[in-house]
Amino acid sequence: MTERRYSDTEIAAIFRAAADGPPQPQREVPREEGLTLAELQTIGREVGIAPDAVAQAAHALDLRVGAQSRTFLGLPIGVARTVDLNRRLSDEEWERLVVQLREVFNARGVTRSEGSLRQWTNGNLQVLLEPTETGHRLRFGTLHGGASAMIGAGLTVLGVAGVVAIASAASGHLGNATTGLVFLSLAGLGMIASGALRLPGWARRRGRQMETIATRVAIPPTSAPPPPTGLPPET
């Protein structure tokens, strides 16, 4: 099999990710003639970038993280990420993953195993490890229950205000009910706004957390190939 070569665009992305920190998965990057991983690692050594960091950033280009979101009234109330690891996670790696999940999401959570299926859950947040033909698939999913409940309650209050307004108008007492209707309407709108305003930032934060964890698991530090022969070892 021909060795993977990286284009100028990919090379720039690899060194940027290797120098800045943990690599993030990229999508739909064209493959053209360019440099091999060994050549990139050689260049990285010359500028002080570790070969492992270059290898992780290079492998991240081929990692595909499927992103999904669940919306309510156009707002992202649910976030999901799926990544095919293309390898099997060992028991030790799963335990380290659980530790990462507890640290990142600041929650102890509960672990369960059913045959080759494993899961870690904490309320609406769940992480599933599922077997595939090529190894394991990691699936993240969460739902902002508090915000969706707040928005639903606000809509209910507005609905009640509407029913009261119709009944009051039919009985000729709409003027007497105006103060109460205004109060109900403002309360309903306030609930909806309170739930809606917190969702965009929460969805972005959860998505980044899931992608970072997925990338770390899919591309462990030990997965980088050894330096090419003939080069002096790092000191």
Image (cartoon, grey):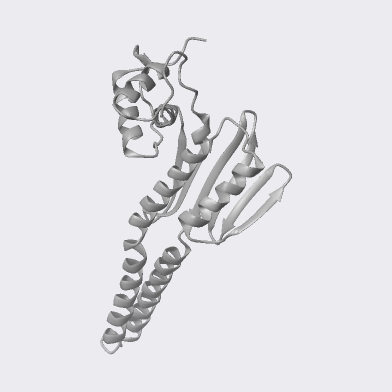
Q: Is residue 10 left or right of residue 145?
A: left
Q: Residue furthest front?
A: 235
Quadrant assignment for the C terminus = top left
Q: Position of residue 212 (x, y in %)?
A: 43, 43
The total number of labels drawn is 0
From the viewer's side, name the closer residue of 1 and 131. Answer: 1
Most extreme residue toward the bottom is: 176
Q: Note whether 170 is above or below 48 in the view shown.
A: below
Q: Residue at x 38, y 57 (%)?
A: 202
Above or below, 124 against 52 in this view is below
Nearer to the camera, 202 or 55:
55
Say whether residue 160 is visible.
yes
Residue 219: tell me if it is visible: no
Residue furthest to the right in view is 115
From the viewer's perspective, is residue 199 above or below residue 58? below
Residue at the (40%, 66%) spot, across then down: 151
- Nearer to me, 172 or 179: 179
Horizontal arrangement in the rendering, residue 203 relative to residue 186 (left or right): right
| Residue 11, percent from left and from top | 32, 23
Quadrant in the rendering for residue 52: top left
**Is 76 above or below relative to 36?**
below
State the image coordinates of residue 193 (x, y, percent, origin top left): 31, 67
